[in-house]
Amino acid sequence: MTEISTISVARRERLTPSPWDGIALCLVAGTLALIIYGAQQMGAPLASAAKAHISLSPSALPGYALRTTLRMFAALAASLLFTFTYATAAAKSQRAGAVLIPILDVLQSVPVLGFLSFTVTGFMAIFPGSVAGAECAAIFAIFTAQAWNMAFSFYQSLRTVPEDLDEASRAFRLSAWQRFWRLEVPFAMPALVWNMMMSMSGSWFFIVASEAISVGNTTITLPGIGSYVALAIERRDLMAVLYAVMAMLVVIVAYDQLLFRPLVAWAQKFRFEQTMGQPTPGVWLLRVLNRARLVQLALMPVQKGFVVVAHAPLTLGRWRWRRSPAQKRWLSFLWGVLWWAVWVVLGVYGLHALYIELAGRIEISEVLEAFRLGLLTLTRVVVLVALASLVWVPIGVWIGLRPAIAMRLQLVAQILAAFPANLLFPVAVVGILHFHLSPNIWLSPLMILGTQWYILFNVIAGASAFPSDLRDAAANFRVGGRHWWFKVMLPGIFPYFITGGLTASGGSWNASIVAELVIWGNTRLEAQGLGSYIAKATVAGDYPRIILGVMVMAVFVTLFNRLFWRPLHSYAERRLRMI
């Protein structure tokens, strides 16, 4: 009887609300209310997207911040779905990876303005007369600023899963679906979480272009912090710019505390360790949720549902059509022929459409000029990425090896990464004009301001995931100084650095659209390069030259990735993976 009464008391305690339930309920209810309100605003008539409705009053900023945040999280959800499907297909299939990875190189090289030039009309046609079309175009533009580095990070993690863990999963006869959710996703989670943070911060860099859309004669301005900043820059209102920065900081602090800080702490348990790891720093939101009894009961069905999904194909993988080796070779040959035939047909069709679009409108001399401008931008990208690597790799290692410090500096890093270069236009314009500097040189730092953080975040993720037993072994053998860097730490974080460097270089190409053509009021500064070429063509609505600029940029990025980054990535897979 005593045991029964004890169990009954324990059940009553679990069902009795606690003060922590009230806090959790307020957080959940407030978040849902804001999401519902913002979603209702996104379904308004298209007339509400007119520029006249954007106010520079500080009282309008909370609503604008909510709209911008909802767009960014919608894009983040789409980016996660893209990452889990696209990157997995590229990593699992050698045939698919041979095509999908070059396509990803091309996609990350296409600037946000290049996507907007061709997607705005399509989305507006899908949602005629509604602001939903413009909202989808803005979300898609933000998606293009978030998805690529997450996909590259997940791809790199899948390709470097330790072989002993993979062999253990196969020894336990886990299906491919189970290995994905129980081994590969957990192994990739620390790096993926940091790249999600980088994606959110990096999308602030292009939020102005995403919300203040101007393509040819089409001008659509959506309520948000980006459109607020665009109007403030147009009117040269420095106080409004300051208000926008303050609103942006509040938003970053909010989603850092409510989402990313708990995610980083949760992802620490997935580190690859063979000894006892370092303690995970406490997070106030996780403490609240753990002490909220009703929340725990409400989350139990979700947790059980995820377990069921992760274990669902337990027996499906055993029922397979048994094929002879000759049949397998024949089916593989047919599948390969079909696969390449599809891509050849798509390639021929694309080249034909490109020829029809450009024939008679673009001279050979202009094509050569575009390649010359591309070389100038390439030089800036290489120099800036090299300088950023020298600065941020040591700093990222120092932060990543200290979890407590990483949790404290996590918010600072997000704020610095999120600071849009657009807000530095006044400083750049005034400084260049006052000191009579060359825009070709001094506008270049604006390209790296929003992209150097890819290197920092990925290096922090690599150092955070570095096994403690390897650090202890290096300490026991008294490995220090440059030997510690070149024999222990740099090899350990090298795959993560490759991901950061590759996405930083692609992001710098994107940033060149904004950085090589700076407008502050009536003052216009231009640096020679492919970015300014595309920016001018976009403003003029010159689609043939937009296509030419985007294609030339894709050629440069793809060749650079294939000749430089891909060999380094292959080397990291062969020689520098945890085994």
Image: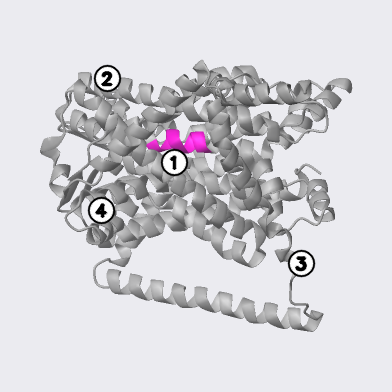
Q: Earlier in the sequence, mark 1 or mark 3?
A: 3
Camera-side residue: 322 or 315? Answer: 315
Q: Please provide the residue range marked out in magenta.
A: 196-203
Camera-side residue: 518 or 80? Answer: 80
Q: Earlier in the sequence, mark 2 or mark 1?
A: 2
Q: Looking at the image, how many numbered discs can be counted on the residues?
A: 4
Q: From this view, report whether residue 453 is shown above or below residue 245.
A: below
Determine the residue positioned at 45% across, 29% down. 417
State the quadrant of the N terminus. Answer: top right
Q: CA distance from mark 4 to mark 1?
A: 28 Å
Residue 354 falls within the magenta-colored stretch: no
Residue 198 falls within the magenta-colored stretch: yes
Return the residue at label 3.
Answer: 318
Residue lying at the far left in this picture: please name it.
52
Return the residue at label 2.
Answer: 242
Q: CA distance from mark 2 to mark 1?
A: 25 Å
Return the residue at label 4.
Answer: 133
Badge 2 crowding class, 10 Å Cα cut-off, few under 14, some 14 to 19, many 20 or more, is: some
Q: From this view, report whether residue 19 is shown above or below residue 521.
A: above
Return the residue at label 1.
Answer: 508
Badge 3 crowding class, 10 Å Cα cut-off, few under 14, some 14 to 19, many 20 or more, is: few
Q: Are marks 2 and 3 in contact (CB under 8 Å)?
A: no
Dot 1 lies on which element? helix
Q: Are marks 1 and 3 in contact (CB under 8 Å)?
A: no
